[in-house]
Image (tube, rainbow, N blue to C red):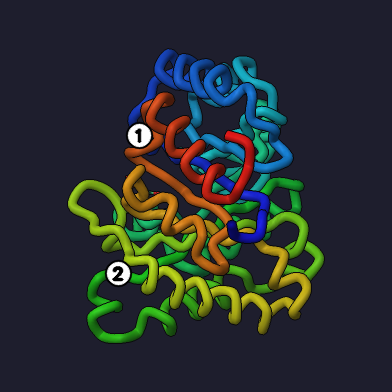
Amino acid sequence: MEKQKHIYLGTNTKMYKTIQDTTSFLSSLSALTADIDRKYMTLFVIPSFTTLDAARKTVPADVIRLGAQNMGWEDQGQFTGEISPLMLKEVGTQIIEIGHSERRHVLMETDEMENKKVLCALRHGFTPLLCIGETGKQKELGISAETLRIQLKVGLKDVTPQQAATQLWIAYEPVWAIGVGGTPASKEYAMEMHAVIRDTVKEMFGEEAGSAIPLLYGGSVNRENAVELAVVPNIDGLFIGRSAWDAENFNLLIRDVLKVWGYPS
Ligand code: PGA
């Protein structure tokens, strides 16, 4: 049995679930996982903005943490279509997902924009979940590590070691692995890239703070590959899309992962 670690398991429901869908998903997920001691696992769900208020009223924060899929970087102002940190705080949000591949590649967000969001989220006491990952083209060119290092160095510019150690989470989600048509990364490849990320954050924030940041893997995680990915060194959790949107399937995946770590499941 491997050494036990605290594991982070969560899902971003993208633009799929309505208020009704989200609250019934959260109710089922919290009932199905009620016997699992949260000292082993942090469980989180990142649904659409309009669902957050009802979602927070459906489950307590210590059972399922809730996040927003994006956030503007100013408290208020002339930013039509953006959501402010104050508005997200008002509805009990704890995590801010920043720079998901779809935000970067469909909505054209840049590392500089992600950096402003990270700093704003930290200022307001949220947990920023910065998502990074290379495209298939960058992988082909052999510049995956370089790409990740740029995304980290620009996206986390001016973050202090103290903030990094206590507030920040990072998700590695190779763009070619995400969504319908994506191929999951092999455990060897995930191990190599997670080592690059760990080394880079240690270089940026020091050995202690760099080691404390939870690093999550995401991209076509399913019940077939969750266990082998969850035991990879420097993978502290899984960030799941499609395979987690059904509460029963997510619960089974959670239990597979906890079991391999030797937790009661
Ligand atoms: P997927 O999505 O698990 O459906 O590939 C992952 C993600 O977009 O975070």
Disc number for residue 100: none
Left or right of residue 137: residue 143: right
| Residue 76 in view, yes or no | no
Q: Is the residue marked by circle 2 packed among few (<14), some (14-19), or many (20+) residues within 10 Å?
A: some
Q: In the picture shown, does residue 171 fall above or below 87?
A: below
Q: In the picture shown, does residue 193 fall above or below 41?
A: below
Labels 1 and 2: the sequence-earlier one: 1
Residue drawn at (45%, 21%) of the image:
25
Secondary-structure class at tag 1:
loop
Residue drawn at (45%, 72%) of the image:
191
Which sits in the foreground, 88 or 64? 64
The residue under label 1 is 15
Secondary-structure class at tag 2:
loop
**Residue 3, position as x, y percentages in the image:** 65, 60
Residue drawn at (47%, 30%) of the image:
251
**Residue 238, position as x, y percentages in the image:** 49, 51
Residue 197, quarter of the rendered image: bottom right
Alpha carbon of mark 1 to alpha carbon of mark 2: how far? 22 Å
Residue drawn at (37%, 57%) of the image:
101
Q: In the picture shown, does residue 120 fall above or below 58?
A: below
What amino acid is found at the position of numbered circle 1 in the picture? Met
Left or right of residue 3: residue 173: left
**Residue 177, position as x, y percentages in the image:** 29, 59
CB under 8 Å between discs 1 and 2:
no
Q: Quadrant where the C terminus lies? A: top right
Left or right of residue 106: residue 255: right
What amino acid is found at the position of numbered circle 2 in the picture? Thr
| Residue 66 in view, yes or no | yes
Q: In the picture shown, does residue 211 fall above or below 241?
A: below
Disc number for residue 135: 2
